[in-house]
């Protein structure tokens, strides 16, 4: 599962200025089943735009890496890539922090790292 809520609350045509900020404290619950969740930011951060690319930062780098690798990348490698790239670029481009998170259910905690997107 991939969650990127960069434009929540506003339309893409209007941009983020028209969007209202919403802060929701996520529940601390364990995932159930065979699931890995890629979140575009931590529960206390906003998912930031990459205006020059007309995407959210997270979406841009996720799609870029999927295109480069044709999906032949492990979930672990994607997680590391997104954390490094989005974390750095958020500061450079938006002057704010954005740290993607990867949450894994206990059922797959010893398996997910080698799974691939393709």
Image (spheres, helix red, strand yellow):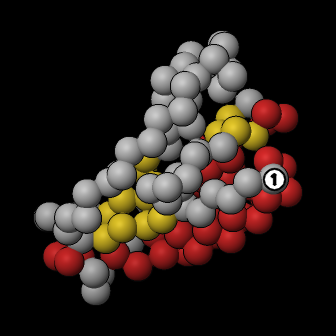
- Quarter-wise, where is residue 28 in the image? bottom left
Q: Is residue 36 left or right of residue 74?
A: left
- Residue 90, placed above or below residue 20: below
Total numbered labels? 1
| Residue hosting label 1 | 95
Residue 14 location (% of width, % of height) = 66, 14
Q: Report whether residue 34 is seen.
A: no
Q: Position of residue 49 (x, y in %)?
A: 70, 39
Q: Position of residue 80 (x, y in %)?
A: 59, 74
Question: For the view shown, which residue lies furthest in the bottom direction?
Answer: 110
Compare residues 86 and 20 and report the one nearer the observer.
Answer: 20
Picture quarter with the C terminus: bottom left
79 versus 109 height, above or below: above
Q: Position of residue 75 (x, y in %)?
A: 46, 69
Name which residue lies at 79% across and 33% down.
Answer: 51
Tag 1's secondary structure? loop
Where is 60 relative to 36, above or below? above
Residue plotted at (54% across, 19% down): 10
Position of 82 with respect to 28 (left or right) is right
Query: Does the image show residue 51?
Result: yes
């Amino acid at each position: 599962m991939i969650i990127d809520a960069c434009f929540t609350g506003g339309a893409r045509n209007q941009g983020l200025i028209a969007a209202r900020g919403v802060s929701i404290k996520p529940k601390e619950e364990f995932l159930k089943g065979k699931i890995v969740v890629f979140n575009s930011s931590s529960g206390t951060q906003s998912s930031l735009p990459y205006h020059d690319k007309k995407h959210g930062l997270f979406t841009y780098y996720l799609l870029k890496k999927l295109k480069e690798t044709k999906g032949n990348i492990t979930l672990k490698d994607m997680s590391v890539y997104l954390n490094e790239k989005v974390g750095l670029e958020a500061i450079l481009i938006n002057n704010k922090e954005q740290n993607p998170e990867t949450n894994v259910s206990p059922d797959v905690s010893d398996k997910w790292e080698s799974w691939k997107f393709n």
